[in-house]
Amino acid sequence: MKNIRKYISALCVAAGLIILMNACKVGKDYVQPKLKLPNTFRGDTLDYFGDTSSMGLIHWKSFFHDPTLKLLIDSALANNFEMKTALLNLQISTRVLAQNKSNYLPSVNATIANGSRTWRSRDFGSGPLTKYYERKGEKARENMFVYQSQFGSDISFSWEIDIWKKISSKQEQLLAEYLDTQEAKNAIRTNIITAVAKGYFNLLMLDAKIEVAKRNVQLNDSTLRMIKLQYNAGEITALAIQQTESQRLLAASLVPELEKQIVIQENALQTLTGRLPDSIRRGTSYEHLFAESKDISLGSPIEIVRNRPDIRSAEFQLMAANANANIQQAMRYPSLNIGGVLGVNAMLPRNWFNIPGALLGGITGNLTTPIFKNKTLKTQYEVARLERDKAEILLQQKVVEAVAEVSNAVVTVDKQREQLELARQRVDNAHLAVKNANLLFKSGYATYLEVITAQSNALDSDLDLVELRQQHLDGFVDLYRSLGGGWR
């Protein structure tokens, strides 16, 4: 009875020590560092942007209006190979995170059956247990050898008590890594949306360029017929026909080049959607492709910290590095392990299940601490702290780069609007010049060179306007992405 009381008292003392040590935690909890953020984005003073809903918070299905583009983006998000890989990485992180929660529980192993036989000299077996040794035939008697048999079955367990919160810190690290994987998936999602939108806009631009080229070919055909009539009348030389034909061939040569680029762009878009090369149905207008309105604002700079996947990913990496530093610090402190075994054991098979005589049980407790590890633990802890500092620097870098990216996108969108207005005026002026040059040429007040020059200027002006329209669309998409839009 006294032994039982002593045993219970020892268990109570041990439990108290475990609770006390379990309340201890080394290292520092994560605190978000002070980030370098301006009050407003540079360029946000422009009248083009309003002060209502933030662009970065708009769902991509509300941001883009073209039905064909929406279908392409939906298909890409469902079938893109990078997205599928990111989803699998997310599942891997989920399982690793769930497994670490089980580290709070003891590990249990069962030995279904074991047996052993050891031969010893006769002198080894002396004492009360000698009767359990059996001689092995006449040769054993001559050589004075005996053997001992052991048969058993047991269940054992081992449990590491979470002193210094090592398991908790590991859980924090794995959670941060899981969230980092989630943000990596969001970043891929945003990049896919951006790439599909830009590829679609490029297709529209190439279609528009082909229309411009074909229209100029028809215009040059009309001019060439007129010049041939004047050549037959002896009013001009053959040089005029040759130069006009060269201008017509220049416009005509653009068509096969643009057709090649269209096929390449269609194949690239199909690859993004995880499909084999094929043609892509698309709209025919640049108008109303996405939400371009004065009711949209840039939002505050602090919003990009919450919205941009790359910044959120960098912060989760910092959290994981901070937790790892805590783990490496805790590795330098004592660890407590509790173990035990319960089963049956007998020297003779017939006594294996002789209960309670064959019962086997025991419990162990180990409190160990590292003393000398060739500075390995200290170095690992110092390296982990430096890695944490590196992660914080990376976070600061991502924030500064994001603010600059938004500012660049704002200025680009605004200045492209000014360029578009000037380009439209240039196109109108070039078309008027072509019309006047043809009238003057028919009246004899302009040369064929003036007509060719006017047509060449008109072709260049039309192509430049088409390219500027596409650049403006791309710039608006870049602004949407830089503000953290697209992943929701």
Image (spheres, rainbow, N blue to C red):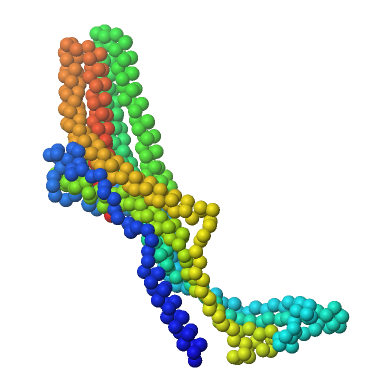
Q: In x, y percent, where is residue 270?
A: 39, 46
The one of 341 and 245 positioned closer to us in this rendering: 341
Q: With respect to residue 471, does 123 lie above or below?
A: below
Q: Is residue 169 left or right of 415 when viewed as pictured?
A: right
The one of 306 and 384 positioned closer to us in this rendering: 384
Give the total number of marks visible in the rendering.
0
Q: In x, y percent, where is residue 301?
A: 21, 46
Q: Can I make out residue 16 in this image?
A: yes
Q: In x, y percent, where is residue 439?
A: 17, 17
Q: In x, y percent, where is residue 24?
A: 37, 66
- Residue at (63% x, 79% y) in the render: 113
Q: Is residue 255 left or right of 106 when viewed as pictured?
A: left
Q: Can I make out residue 281 in this image?
A: no
- Residue at (56% x, 82% y) in the render: 361
- Residue at (47% x, 53% y) in the render: 378
- Residue at (16% x, 47% y) in the render: 296
Q: With respect to residue 106, does 77 lie above or below?
A: above
The quarter of the picture where residue 430 lies is top left
Quarter of the figure with the C terminus:
bottom left
